[in-house]
Amino acid sequence: MQIRKLGANGADVSSLGIGAMSFANFYGPTTDENSYAILDAAMEAGVTHIDTSNVYGMGRSETAIGEFLKSRGQEARDHFVIATKAGISKDADGNRVFDNSPEHFEAELDKSLARLGVECVDLFYMHRYQAERPIEEVAEALAALVKKGKTKSIGLSEIAPSTLRRAAAVHPIAAVQSEYSLATRAPELGLLQACEELGTAFVAFSPVGRSFLTDDPIPASRVPELEFLKVNPRFKQPNYDYNIAATDAFRALAAEMGMPAASLAIAWTLHKGDHMLPIPGTRSTAHFAELVKGAEVVLSDTDVVRIEQVLPVGWAYGDRYSAGQWVGPERFS
């Protein structure tokens, strides 16, 4: 397993990580035992980076990780570099709001530490930006948690390059997390470059395109069962069928190159820079093995040209988010 840096002065981590949203029923029902099987496989494969959040299953993901660490002992705790997040909340009427106040960050991090069963996390993110609050104040609030010994480093999620630069002027930003894959390439419009310039790791979530870049895409029949996907433009008809047809050529290319499609998608992502850290999620140990294989593949420039001829920039049908899902992430161009 390749080793990369979680920020210029951050921890050494495996080039492939685990996105633990899948531990909380996001893409379908799961069990804690199933999540433990993924974490056991990660330890065996040398995958050390695990990414979670206080809102994944309203604490369920963190609790599953914490119970796993408790059951496996100090070896497991020493193995994993743990990242979590806060900043998404609800108002009195139950509507989703964003809270980047120092009080919210610390209170939620304290709860996360208790669920995880640790005294300090390796990385703590602002999950969504509360736009009316200056990002400099947000960076100061996060930095205060480093000084208190509750996190070793700080990160930002779904932000613009200009916001990153302003925050980094206050305190080093170890990582920025955003969606990035062959299906979603907007970060190439300055965010990847800003991260590289500032020594910030780029943590890519959904690197296999929410299953479109695999050999087993989520079938149309299951989409209505999944709260996020049933309103997502790429999974609504006719876009869903168009996206399946477009990615059939990618699956054929992966087979020609002798690997699963998910492996090729991960290899492509890692090829995009030494600061790139994909964090796919899965409920399947077989799929996890495909993801690990992708981290072992080294693509040539010729390979990348072939991949991007099959899936050029802008190939996907439908926006990556619905109007409601776009509330929170910063857009930039």
Image (tube, rainbow, N blue to C red):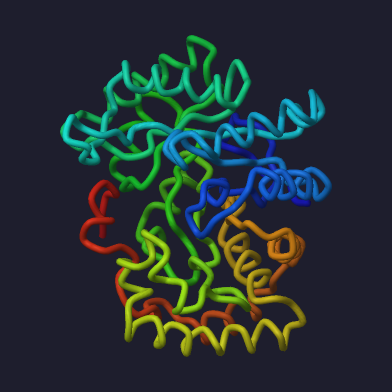
* Left or right of residue 291: residue 206: left
* Left or right of residue 135: residue 93: left
Which residue is pictured at 39% across the width and 81% down the height? 240
Which residue is pictured at 47% across the width and 72% down the height? 222
Q: Quadrant of residue 71?
A: top right
Q: Which quadrant would the C terminus be assigned to in this image?
A: bottom left
State the residue in front, 277 or 193.
Answer: 277
Q: Quadrant of residue 250?
A: bottom right
Compared to residue 147, the image places residue 276 above or below, namely below
Q: Position of residue 249 (x, y in %)?
A: 56, 89
State the residue in front, 121 or 199.
Answer: 121
Compared to residue 92, the image places residue 102 above or below, namely above
Q: Position of residue 194 (x, y in %)?
A: 41, 47
Which residue is pictured at 55% across the width and 56% down the height? 29
State the residue in front, 209 or 133.
Answer: 209
Which residue is pictured at 33% across the width and 77% down the height? 236
Q: Quadrant of residue 107?
A: top left
* Left or right of residue 159: residue 243: right
Compared to residue 150, the image places residue 329 above or below, namely below
* Left or right of residue 106: residue 288: right
Q: Residue furthest top?
A: 148
Compared to residue 260, the image places residue 209 above or below, namely above
Q: Position of residue 306 (x, y in %)?
A: 59, 84
